[in-house]
């Protein structure tokens, strides 16, 4: 936004485009104008560090003033613009250090265990630890198990499809199921010439036995030249 402003665009246009007030744009201009992106990132990091260390420094200054001057705590906190509750704050001790150390040991012994299985091991050791706490500490320690990617096996080249050059070279057989309007099941046997796409036979009944299929194919063979595929498969499938 500031780059566009330096390039000569109007503040009112940028305000409508980005949905911010003109006062905010003028404030950013006075504070960040002329800075590069890397400098802005560094300034943001310094602000966050200052915000984090500021209460600590103020508590230290207030403690020095209370020890060196005969003034009350209330007055010194008012002079340093610090809340009394903030001055009296004491960091809580970390009671999870021993648990985190044990978690790291178990993670080294069982590198493929996630936080759920580590929680089971904790319960077996007699530690009453909530599973959500185990997950939180597990993630804080950076012990997230990486998922194993499945290795793709190299597949052999598929055999090339048979090149069809004439009719009756290859017939395709298929069984199809359907139902009537009354809900009764039907079975259909279809025989199609793979080269001409001609339907050679359709056998329909509520059930088709091996004898019915053999009879249908023999009827087609009587009207057609001998077919090598059918003669080879027929004795094996229905013989």
Image: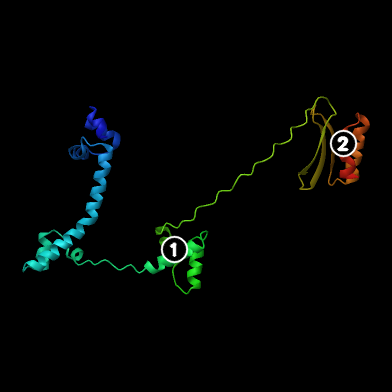
Q: Which residue corresponds to the image point at 17% horizontal and 65% vertical from the top-left?
A: 84
Q: Quadrant of residue 37?
A: top left
Which residue ends up furthest to the right in the rendered image? Answer: 222
Residue 186 coordinates in the image, percent (x, y): 80, 44
Closer to the N terminus: mark 2 or mark 1? 1
Q: Where 11 sits versus 149, above or below?
A: above
Q: Which mark is residue 104?
A: 1
Front-most of 121 and 171? 121
Q: Which residue corresponds to the image point at 42% horizontal and 64% vertical from the top-left?
A: 133
Front-most of 156 and 54? 156
Q: Secondary structure at mark 1?
A: helix
Relative side of 62 to 136, left or right: left
- Badge 1 crowding class, 10 Å Cα cut-off, few under 14, some 14 to 19, many 20 or more, is some
- Asked if residue 96 shows in the view, the reply is no
Q: Which mark is residue 135?
A: none
Rounded to the nearest whole Å, what is the CA distance between mark 2 and mark 1?
Answer: 67 Å
In this picture the colour scheme is rainbow
Q: Residue under circle 2? A: 230
- Asked if residue 6 shows in the view, the reply is yes
Q: Where is the C terminus found, in terms of image quarters?
A: top right
Front-most of 32 and 185? 32
Residue 48 coordinates in the image, percent (x, y): 25, 51
Q: Which residue corresponds to the image point at 46% horizontal and 65% vertical from the top-left?
A: 105
Q: Quadrant of residue 1?
A: top left
């Amino acid at each position: 936004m500031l780059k566009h402003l330096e390039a000569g665009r109007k503040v009112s246009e940028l305000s409508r485009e980005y949905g911010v007030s003109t006062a905010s744009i003028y404030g950013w201009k006075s504070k960040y104008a002329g800075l590069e992106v890397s400098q802005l990132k560094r300034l943001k990091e310094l602000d966050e560090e200052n915000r984090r260390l500021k209460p600590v420094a103020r508590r230290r200054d207030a403690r020095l003033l209370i020890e060196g001057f005969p003034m009350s705590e209330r007055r010194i906190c008012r002079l340093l613009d610090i809340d009394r509750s903030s001055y009296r704050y004491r960091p809580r001790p970390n009671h999870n250090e021993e648990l985190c150390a044990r978690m790291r040991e178990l993670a080294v012994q069982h590198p493929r265990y996630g936080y759920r299985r580590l929680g089971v091991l904790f319960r077996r050791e007699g530690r009453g630890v909530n599973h959500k706490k185990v997950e939180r500490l597990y993630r804080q320690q950076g012990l997230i198990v990486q998922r194993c990617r499945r290795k793709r096996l190299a597949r052999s080249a598929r055999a090339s499809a048979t090149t069809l050059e004439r009719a009756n070279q290859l017939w395709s057989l298929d069984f199809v199921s359907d139902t009537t309007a009354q809900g009764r099941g039907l079975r259909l046997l279809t025989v199609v010439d793979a080269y001409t796409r001609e339907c050679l036979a359709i056998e329909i009944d509520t059930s088709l036995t091996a004898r019915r299929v053999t009879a249908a194919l023999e009827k087609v063979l009587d009207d057609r030249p001998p077919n090598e595929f059918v003669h080879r498969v027929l004795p094996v499938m229905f013989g």
